[in-house]
Amino acid sequence: MAVDAGWVRTSSKDNRFVVAVGGSWVVGTAGELDRRLHDIAPGKLRSITLDLSEVAALDTSGAWLLLRTQRRLVAEGREVAIENLAPILAPLLQQVAETGCEVPPDMHPRRRFGDFIARIGKVTITQIVGAGALLGFIGLVAITVMRTIRHPSRVRLAALFQHMEQTGLNSLPVIGMLSFLVGVVFAFQGADQLRTFGAEIYTVNLLGIAILRELGVLLTAIILAGRSGSAFTAQIGTMKVNEEVDAMEVLGLDPIEVLVLPRLFAMMITLPLVAFFANIMGLLGGAIMCWATLDISIPTFLRQLRSPLPGWSFWVGILKAPTFAGIIALTGCYEGLRVSRSAESVGRLTTRSVVESIFLIILADAVFSIIFSYARI
């Protein structure tokens, strides 16, 4: 015998709002029943009865719709009672209720200005707490560095040279190629603009100051933040997931000394060297572009580059490198040690470490620019 399709009827009786349902409450009719349940309007009546006496068939989807409707009405401050369900169907409704039937969030919630302010406050507090934790981690690393300086034999040279190879030597091709292309583009764009004033020769000056003071070291730091900083977080995070860091602590080894210091020292040694290489490649690209478009020979390029260039221009970029290196290494290791025992957190914190590193690098570069400006360097 065919089962009737599900239906919903509403009525009022003795100051109670009665919702009578019946027919087949199964997955095949759930879509239409869901729309009908959303149309229920009890008005000002606070007491509501769900009369299930005529329900002929019920599965988990139908039970979920009924329980969701009940909880939605209760959330509105109404008293809701479910009555007259057949004994054979009652266990299913009870099982779905025990499993959990949360009221789904409104797809278009009403936005209030107070919620916006609360969200800003929550994000601000989270960032302040995170900054405090990072500052505490930096202090812990500084104490470990002091202890290592007193006992240099505790430095793990094998790990140090391995990370120097990974962060320095292996990054030279990509950094060299990108720096070369940046020099080409910068020289071409500078010449195109200065040609309007008949001052194409000053393209060399513009290129030298931009590459040596800013672009060379900044581009190198950003690339290493995405390449090596993310690798630090992923490596240490994977060790956290595999409980290798816990095993290290059980054996009496200090994770800061074993995992952080070799990466920190390697980055601080290699980044200035790689930045110097990036400067050379950027100037080389600019020199080739000047020779090709402006007919400025390489000897002329070098004379023009050296004559008006301030003596500190080269060292300004190099002096920034150790600070950028410390930011990359400390941020990458800090986020790696914060990984929980799940693969999802490894990817999330790896992305976060790259974003934080690049933000802090640019912030530090802005601070350096202000300091050098006041110092007239």
Image (cartoon, rainbow, N blue to C red):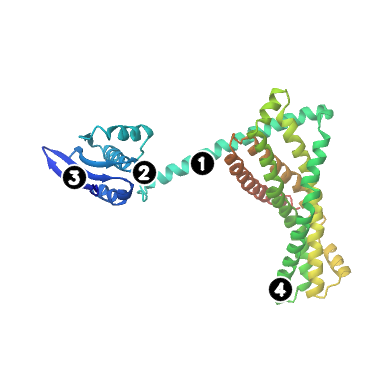
Q: Nearer the viewer, mark 4 or mark 2?
A: 2
Which residue in the protein does label 4 denote? 192
In the image, 176: left or right of 341?
right
Is residue 115 depicted above or below 278 in this figure? above
Under circle 1, the secondary element is helix
Between discs 3 and 1, the one toward the N terminus: 3
From this viewpoint, which residue is outermost toward the right?
299
Label 4 and label 3: CA atoms lie apart by 72 Å
Between discs 2 and 3, the one toward the N terminus: 3
Q: Nearer the viewer, mark 3 or mark 1?
A: 3
Label 3 and label 1: CA atoms lie apart by 42 Å
Which residue in the protein does label 2 denote? 104
Is residue 353 depicted above or below 260 in this figure? below
Q: Nearer the viewer, mark 4 or mark 3?
A: 3
Q: Residue at x 74, y 72 (%)?
A: 191
Q: Nearer the viewer, residue 296 or 40?
A: 40
Residue 248, horizontal then vertical, whole percent = 71, 27
Which residue in the protein does label 3 denote? 43
In the image, 118: left or right of 7?
right
Q: Residue at x 17, y 45 (%)?
A: 10
Q: Residue at x 68, y 32 (%)?
A: 139
Residue 175, horizontal then vertical, whole percent = 76, 55
Tag 2 and tag 3, C-beta contact below 8 Å: no
Which residue in the protein does label 1 denote? 124
Q: Nearer the viewer, mark 2 or mark 1?
A: 2
Question: Which kind of residue does numbered mark 2 sit on?
Answer: Pro
Question: Which kind of residue does numbered mark 3 sit on?
Answer: Gly
Label 2 and label 3: CA atoms lie apart by 22 Å
